Amino acid sequence: MSAAQELEHLALKYAEKAVTLDRQGRSELAIEAYQKAVDALLKIVKLNPDYELNKIYLQRAEVYKKRIEVLKSSLNMSPATADSSSEGTHFEDMILRETPKVTWDEIVGLEDAKRAIKEAIVYPSLRPELFPLGWPRGILLFGPPGCGKTLLAAAVANEIKAKFIPADAASIMSKWLGEAEKNVARLFDLARREAKGSPVIIFIDEIDSLVGVRRFEIGGEVRVRNQFLKEMDGILDKKNPLRVYVVGATNKPWDLDPPFIRRFQKRIYVPPPGYKERLEAFKLYTKPLKLASDVDLDKLARLTEGFSGSDIMDVCQSVQLKVNSEIFENCEDYMKAEPRPITMKDFLEILEKRKPSVTREMLTQYEKWFNEFKAL
């Protein structure tokens, strides 16, 4: 056992002891155990300063520190109150019971991705009797940041009127040490209960941080991954009538553990926009803006090769900020002044200060992975 694994084992032991003592109302002993858990977690971070999940360990340590302060300020806290304060992640609070207001029309381009998602989720939801062999319940969306993965998940939830549960590694792992695998079980149990009335989409952003392959690994992550595999197998059962879908999004598909790749029956590449899509994006984002007659959206689309949809929105937003700032800086009565029309020069000045977020090397890596693992 490595030093870090030993420390994690100690942190787990002290955290479990602290929670038990806390729930029993034995505050002084709970404080001591929480502090030992904090010390062990901070030592893990110090021992492995570049470890990818240090953020989660620091979050856990912070939660325990806050609990220590609460206990110190009120040593007469009742066991019942302590118990309610130390519960795990409340996934019920995360459910978006009103479906996201995102439509397919708001997503520029990505026709292949839209078609694959409709085939996998929308059509089976509309006519389940046409699919006696079942249909995919695990969908992986991968590609560069800012290219529409989250929007696609929101749009399909809107299309089938599904309850939408957004989750990530932090919401699952950062509450109480040793509770992470239980949080995975709670998340899926909640989805199964909610799916008795309508479809449910569990959307896990940056899923690689939850189920990715690690150079250095400790016991808690292994338990979480095993629980996740068990839950995924449960919803993938074609005899299961419940409509629970897991949509995972990642910018680093090559970091995923192979068993999870197989559980995502649809693996959909979400690439950066081409010229036509960039032109449509500029039309969409400049629609509410006051443009001068010299603004050439066609030229802007050609100049922004490699820009993601999010990059293009940021360009349009930056131009808006630039022009509006002139009112506050140059007009005495800025509450009544109107901004001047945005010119082509304004766009070009902004583009001089921005670079695309996606490089050719990044695209080559995505395309290589897609050709190896594609499942549309």
Image: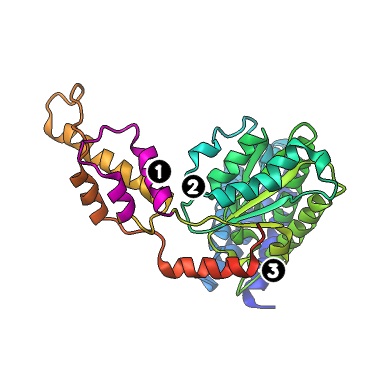
Which residue is pictured at 39% across the width and 38% down the height?
284
In the picture shown, does residue 84 fall above or below 12? above
Residue type at mark 3? Pro
Counting other residues with Cα less than 10 Å from the Cα at mark 3, is it few (<14), some (14-19), or many (20 or more)? few
Q: Which of the two labelled residues, at mark 2 and mark 3, occupies the earlier sequence position? A: 2
Q: Nearer the viewer, residue 83 or 166?
A: 166
Q: Nearer the viewer, residue 354 or 2?
A: 354
**Element on which disc 3 rests:** helix
Residue type at mark 1? Glu
Residue type at mark 2? Gly
In the picture shown, does residue 50 fall above or below 266? below
In the picture shown, does residue 337 fall above or below 270? above
- Image marks 3 and 1: residues in contact by CB distance under 8 Å: no
**Element on which disc 1 rests:** helix
Q: Which of the two labelled residues, at mark 2 and mark 1, occupies the earlier sequence position? A: 2
- Image marks 2 and 1: residues in contact by CB distance under 8 Å: yes
Give the extent of the magenta segment. 274-302
Name the residue carrying label 3.
258
